[in-house]
Image: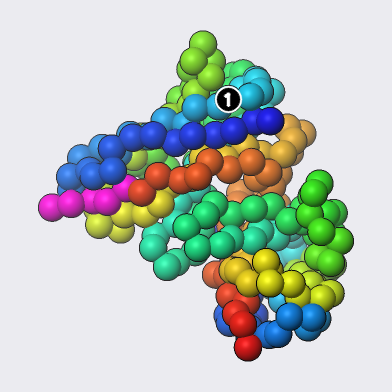
Amino acid sequence: QVQLQESGPGLVKLSETLSLTCIVSGGSINSYYWTWIRQPAGKGLEWIGRIYASSGNTNYNPSLKSRVSMSVDMSKDQFSLMLTSVTAADTAMYYCARERELLRGDAFDIWGQGTMVTVSS
Amino acid sequence: DIQMTQSPSTLSASVGDRVTITCRASQSISDWLAWYQQKPGKAPKLLIYKASTLESGVPSRFSGSGSGTEFTLTISSLQPDDFATYYCQQYNDYWTFGQGTKVEIK
């Protein structure tokens, strides 16, 4: 079955760039939208953005759009998130996930275990 | 932005209880609504999508209903494994989540 695994630095300095990668295993990265979601400790979930593996087409949360970029490397079955100019408000657990179906925006049926990112001064 | 509001924020219940959580959208989202269960230290797990469709492998004691702006998640007979936080999510226009409902032991 498809599994997702996030990786990246657990500590990022204030005003620098957060970079995370999600590896897809057990299935094809093709023909799905792949997404990033974050969750500050003790708080709710926030959708960051998504990328369609086959075309690289992206959609971003308007509140983060100026600082977010996503990319995909199909040869490695992985996709990535970059978030620039981080502040303490970006400290959170970051999850990657898969959208159920391609036809329209959909729910997220497979999630990674998450990776904690702390922004330090 | 579509805002999602869940009630209650916390719910105390006993094993065997029937539990209902409500989610309201700030504008109509048709039936583009999902429910997730999250346990401490774990990723959310999809329970229901398209307002009422049970995800494969999810016990039938979970059910969802509603359309437009008002939705409910019902657990027909609460089991020990069900104590968790539940989130609704709209995916009609981008994706936004409710603030969560924690189901705790009474």
* Residue B20 seen in the current view: no
Say which of B24 and B103 sits in front.
B103
Q: Nearer the viewer, residue B85 or A51?
A: B85
Q: Report helix, strand or loop for mark 1.
A: strand
Q: Quadrant of residue A42?
A: bottom left
Residue reaching furthest to the top = A75
**Residue A106 position within the rendered picture, expressed as x and y whole percent measured from the top left:** 71, 44
Direction from residue A112 to residue B87 in the image, left or right: right
Of all residues, the one furthest to the left in this rendering is A121
How far across and how far down the image is residue B12, in percent? 63, 86
**Magenta stretch containing residue A102, yes or no?**
no
Viewer-side residue, A39 vs A59: A39
Residue positioned 58% across, 75% down in the render: B102
Q: Nearer the viewer, residue B63 or A52?
A: B63
Give the magenta part as a residue range: A117-121
Residue type, label 1: Ser
Location of residue B6 with respect to B46 vertically, above or below: below
Q: Residue at x 45, y 51 (%)?
A: A38
Query: Residue B103 appears at what percent x and percent y?
Result: 62, 77
Provide residue B35's location: percent of width, then percent of height.
Answer: 70, 60
Q: Main secondary structure of the magenta part?
A: strand
Residue plotted at (37% across, 54% down)? A92
Does residue A120 lie above or below B71 as drawn? Answer: above
- Kindly identify which residue carries mark 1: A25
Which coloring applies here?
rainbow
